[in-house]
Image: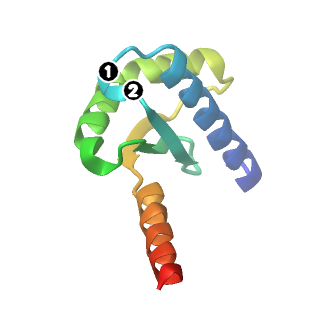
Amino acid sequence: MPSQVRIQRIADRIRQELSELLVREISDPRLQQIFITDVSVDRELAYADVYVSAVEGAARSGEILKGLKHARSFLRHELAARVELRVIPQLRFYWDPTPENADHIERLLAQIKEE
């Protein structure tokens, strides 16, 4: 089994490559203005959990996840060409509410500061 450092390097590389693919290769309008917040890979390198968010927030989360599910095989194929691994993990996409939560906390703190 790979070390925790190697798993993290693989996850970072997958995040970087997927981000570039989403910007340069994907023309699906459902996948415009989204960004990858995190990638975690399991110890067996069988699955990569990809966490995404969008500029607009959760309003389009269902549409975005559906578009990513549709593009999953293309993204995995492109990752295989760009990342040198014997087996490319299966991609699973999840919505990440962290940016929205951080924005909400920032607004609450600004409101408290005004009072």
Q: Which residue is rendered at x = 37% and y = 27% of the image?
A: 31
Tag 1, which secondary structure?
helix
Extreme residue in the front direction: 114
The location of residue 55, given as percent across then percent down, is 42, 41
Q: Which residue is mark 1?
A: 29
Residue 87 visible, this orientation: no
Residue 47 pos. (x, y %): 47, 42
Q: Which amino acid type is shown beneath numbered disc 1? A: Pro
Going 54% across and 29% down the picture, which residue do you hit?
Answer: 18
Q: Looking at the picture, does residue 53 appear above or below residue 115?
A: above
Image position of 35 (left or right of 95): right
Residue at screen point 46% across, 61% down:
103
**Where residue 114 sits in the image (x, y, percent)?**
50, 80
Vertical relation: 56 (above or below) 73 = below
Horizontal side of 89 relative to 32 (left or right) equals right
**Quarter-wise, where is residue 13 in the image?**
top right
Residue 92 figure quarter: top left
Q: Which residue is mark 2?
A: 32
- Asked if disc 1 and disc 2 are in contact, CB closer than 8 Å, the reply is yes
Q: Is residue 67 visible?
A: yes
Name which residue lies at 49% across and 38% down. 35
Q: Position of residue 49 (x, y in %)?
A: 46, 46
Q: Secondary structure at mark 2?
A: loop
Front-most of residues 113 and 43: 113
Q: Residues within 10 Å of mark 2 (few under 14, many from 20)?
A: some
Q: State the separation of the CA atoms marked 1 and 2.
A: 5 Å
In the displayed structure, does residue 43 sit left or right of residue 22?
right
The foreground one among 61 and 4 is 61
Q: Nearer the viewer, residue 33 or 107?
A: 107
Dot 2 amino acid type: Gln
Task: Please say if 107 is above or below 93.
Answer: below
